[in-house]
Image (spheres, rainbow, N blue to C red):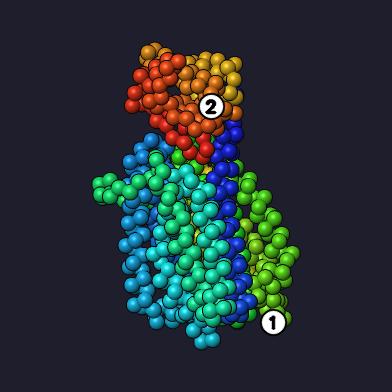
């Protein structure tokens, strides 16, 4: 009998990763193209003005993270436990908050527009460009927040490819409208902002048909009793602080660059921020894969699966970061030319900035993806420190080192050192936790965990091993017989008719779970006139068997 392998976890990771990376890649490529169009059609001042408005965009996104990301994680855990009703109410809660909060931001932002403009822009040369872009950005708040909410929940609901399609189409619209509105309609930087507005609208409209399908999330008006608001805020705070403090970091970095490095430093910083945003293809793509897959694994209390997922994520991310960093170090002139900022005045400072800033990008990615793992397993203080330290410490070190570009990297090293010491101390108190990630190590006698090929010899070995395991627990002989019989019938059906390659069989004192990569098939309520196997299973497990199709895999859970 084979021990648990990473085959199905890797397959689930790859299935979500491809769609997530494609989604983020389409967004960031479009952002780079957007920046390139603005830089070449309006000039480097236009690029700097867009960068000066980024704190507002980041602040809006951070507010959605406070409730939306945590709600999707909790919804994923609920789906893993078979509680679709709770997932529906979490989705509905996020949707309602996005609409109400978005409207309040528009009204408040426009009402305090002059004060906001003074806070963001200290340069008289860039003031009008910044104001023009900022005004339309505020008007885009509601479609922006709706897009974030739909994208997170549709991904968790098992349709990441639809999100990829929506983002690709939306960004094509954005780039096309950039050229039309800036160059041909003579709208200047306002045209770039309106193009982004219509991108959000297109993305929202494209994902709405998802909710017409059977079995998907549904809108259910929630009450406060239905929601664990304390848990939503607890899960959401680390990501909220991380994204909210990025707004402060953007403003602080701009302030430091303007004091110590001048306009050339602001332009170099704008390029660094564009490269940082582009690195989100790796960082956010991986994070958006860990969150939905990890949430469902946590709902199943599948610690081994979580560990395999994290290992797969870091292997992918490490390779990508090495390639990306080498490109930044060896091609600064080409990158600057692409963004319309390559000239004799700016290139010397850009050549100094990019290699040092690439180290910051590496550390940001490696540390950031620890956050959801710490959230899953209740290490809230570590997640919260990561969210604050990763954003504030690089800015403070950049400031303390008087605009030296290595300051960003030094800030990340300090953050990493604190995390390392903290995890060592936590592990010293609980030896069952893994190093760094702090995922519980399940005792071998407390779980039956096996990956089997789809053949009858493996079925016989699994039946025998499962029986021995269940008999070692505090279960009656009747419970053991029923559990083994039902598991055997389900596995036999997968082997004979499912066209799967492998099946993960996992059992604890509470549940037996079967995951396979065969064609979609729901065994609950299925009646075959020519066979009694599934009829017996449904009779014995009435109300105690749950089915879901996630990650392109059948997931059957039996409650003992």
Secondary element under disc 2, as helix, strand or loop, is: loop
Q: CB under 8 Å between callouts 2 and 1?
A: no
User: Quick check: 191 left or right of 109?
Assistant: right
Position of residue 246 measured from the top left corner of the image (x, y, whole percent): 49, 65
Which residue is found at the position 36% from the left and 18% from the top?
540
Q: Is residue 398 in view from this perspective?
A: no
Which residue is found at the position 55% from the left and 15% from the top?
460
User: Quick check: 325 left or right of 4?
Assistant: right
Residue 345's disc number: 1
Position of residue 304 measured from the top left corner of the image (x, y, whole percent): 53, 34
Sequence order check: which comes first, mark 2 or mark 1? 1
Is the C terminus in the top left, top right, bottom left or bottom right quadrant? top left
User: Residue pushed farthest right?
Assistant: 330
Secondary element under disc 1, as helix, strand or loop, is: loop
Residue 498's disc number: 2
What is the CA distance from the residue labelled 2 to the residue labelled 1? 65 Å
């Amino acid at each position: 009998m084979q021990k648990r392998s990473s085959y199905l976890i890797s397959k689930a990771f790859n299935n979500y990763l491809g769609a997530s990376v494609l989604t983020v890649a389409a967004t960031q490529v479009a952002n780079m193209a957007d920046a390139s169009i603005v830089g070449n059609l309006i000039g480097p001042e236009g690029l700097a003005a867009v960068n000066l408005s980024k704190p507002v965009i980041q602040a809006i996104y951070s507010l959605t993270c406070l409730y939306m990301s945590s709600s999707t994680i909790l919804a994923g855990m609920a789906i893993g436990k078979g509680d679709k009703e709770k997932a529906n109410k979490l989705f509905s809660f996020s949707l309602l908050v996005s609409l109400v909060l978005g409207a309040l931001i528009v009204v408040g932002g426009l009402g305090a527009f002059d004060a906001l403009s003074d806070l963001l822009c200290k340069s008289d040369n860039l003031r009008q460009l910044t104001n023009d872009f900022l005004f339309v950005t505020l008007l885009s708040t509601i479609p922006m927040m709706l897009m974030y909410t739909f994208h997170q929940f549709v991904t968790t609901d098992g349709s990441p490819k639809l999100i990829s399609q929506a983002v690709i189409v939306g960004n094509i619209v954005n780039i096309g409208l950039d050229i039309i509105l800036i160059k041909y309609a003579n709208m200047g930087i306002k045209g770039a902002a309106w193009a982004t507005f219509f991108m959000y609208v297109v993305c929202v409209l494209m994902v709405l048909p998802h909710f017409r399908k059977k079995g998907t999330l549904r809108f259910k008006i929630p009450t406060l009793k239905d929601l664990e608001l304390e848990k939503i805020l607890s899960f959401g705070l680390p990501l909220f602080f991380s994204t909210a403090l990025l707004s402060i970091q953007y403003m602080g970095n701009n302030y430091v660059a303007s004091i110590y490095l001048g306009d050339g430093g602001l332009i170099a910083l704008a390029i660094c921020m564009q490269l940082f945003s582009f690195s989100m293809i790796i960082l956010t793509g991986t994070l958006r894969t860990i969150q939905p897959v990890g949430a469902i694994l946590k709902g199943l209390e599948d610690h081994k699966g979580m560990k395999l997922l994290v290992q797969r994520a870091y292997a992918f991310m490490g390779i990508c970061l090495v390639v990306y960093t080498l490109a930044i170090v060896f091609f600064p002139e080409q990158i600057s030319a692409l963004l319309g900022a390559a000239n004799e005045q700016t290139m010397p400072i850009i050549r100094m900035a990019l290699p040092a800033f690439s180290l910051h990008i590496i550390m940001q990615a490696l540390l950031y993806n620890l956050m959801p793992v710490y959230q899953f397993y209740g290490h809230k203080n570590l997640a919260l420190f990561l969210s604050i330290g990763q954003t504030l410490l690089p800015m403070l070190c950049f400031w303390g080192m008087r605009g030296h570009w290595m300051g960003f990297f030094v800030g990340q090293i300090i953050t990493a050192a604190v995390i390392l010491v903290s995890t060592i101390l936590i592990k010293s108190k609980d030896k069952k936790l893994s190093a760094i990630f702090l995922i519980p190590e399940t005792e071998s006698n407390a779980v039956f965990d096996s990956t089997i090929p789809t053949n009858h010899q493996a079925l016989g070995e699994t039946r025998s091993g499962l029986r021995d395991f269940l008999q070692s627990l505090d279960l009656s002989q009747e419970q053991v017989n029923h559990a083994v019989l039902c598991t055997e019938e389900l596995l036999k059906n997968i082997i004979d008719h499912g066209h799967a390659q492998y099946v993960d069989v996992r059992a604890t004192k509470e549940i037996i779970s079967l995951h396979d990569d065969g064609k979609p098939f729901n065994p609950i309520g299925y009646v075959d006139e020519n066979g009694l196997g599934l009829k017996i299973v449904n009779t014995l497990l009435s109300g105690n068997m749950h089915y879901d199709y996630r990650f392109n895999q059948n997931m059957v859970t039996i409650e003992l």
